[in-house]
Image (tube, rainbow, N blue to C red):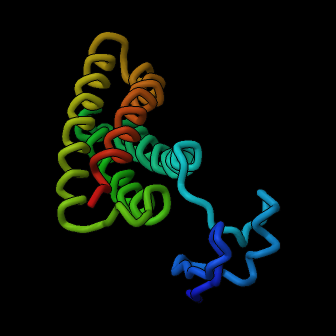
Amino acid sequence: MFQQRGLQDSNGARCYDAEPFFERDRDAASRPDDPRVIRPMTLGRHARHYLLIGGVQWLVDWGVLVGLSHWGMAIEPANVAGRIAGALLGYWLNGKLTFAGDETAIGRTQLLRFVLMWLGTTTVSTWSLGAIDNLAGLKWAWLAKPGVEAVLGVVGFLLSRHWVYRK
């Protein structure tokens, strides 16, 4: 997969480059939509992947919250249970897909950072939904959950990209 390719400098002398060179991608590199070309993870790609995975995560989280609270559990423990269900899915998927790269990892340090971030965002989310439930009722808390989680999702994205998954 790796090979040295000969290049010529401005004086015509031959030099060698040890960077990865994929033979099959030589012609594909000129076409930006070709899936065979390996592209770096940019902010836009990180954001798209985070939104996709976050959408699935949120559906799991919200479904657990609504189901448990509908069956009589208080909103606060139902929210924590929903966030645990979403977090189990999101930590792994975001680490393996969204933020995967040479400068990132999934290990003990990253898990500890994720847990610290999760505890902070879960505290804010649970307090917010409990306050909304007390003031306006359970159905308003269900409706407010997406907005609360959207704000916390922005915070989570920034922390994940720049702190949680870093080596």
Image side of residue 38 versus residue 144, left or right: right
Identify the residue at the far top of this view: 135
Q: Which of these two is toward me, 22 or 69? A: 22
Quarter of the image for residue 141 reads top left
Image coords of residue 8 (percent x, y): 66, 75
Q: Residue at x 34, y 59 (%)?
A: 88
Image side of residue 10 versus residue 166, left or right: right
Q: Residue at x 29, y 22 (%)?
A: 128
Identify the residue at the far front of this view: 11
Q: Quadrant of the N terminus?
A: bottom right
Quarter of the image for residue 70 reads top left
Image coords of residue 86 (percent x, y): 39, 51
Above or below, 2 relative to 164:
below
Number of numbered markers: 0
Above or below, 15 relative to 166:
below
Q: Which of these two is toward me, 47 or 33? A: 33
Q: Which of these two is toward me, 121 or 112? A: 112
Quarter of the image for residue 17 reads bottom right
Q: Residue at x 40, y 41 (%)?
A: 157
Image coords of residue 111 (percent x, y): 23, 59
Above or below, 17 relative to 121:
below
Q: Quadrant of the C terminus?
A: bottom left
Above or below, 63 relative to 7:
above
Q: Which of these two is toward me, 165 or 70? A: 165
Q: Residue at x 17, y 56 (%)?
A: 112
Image coords of residue 41 (percent x, y): 53, 55
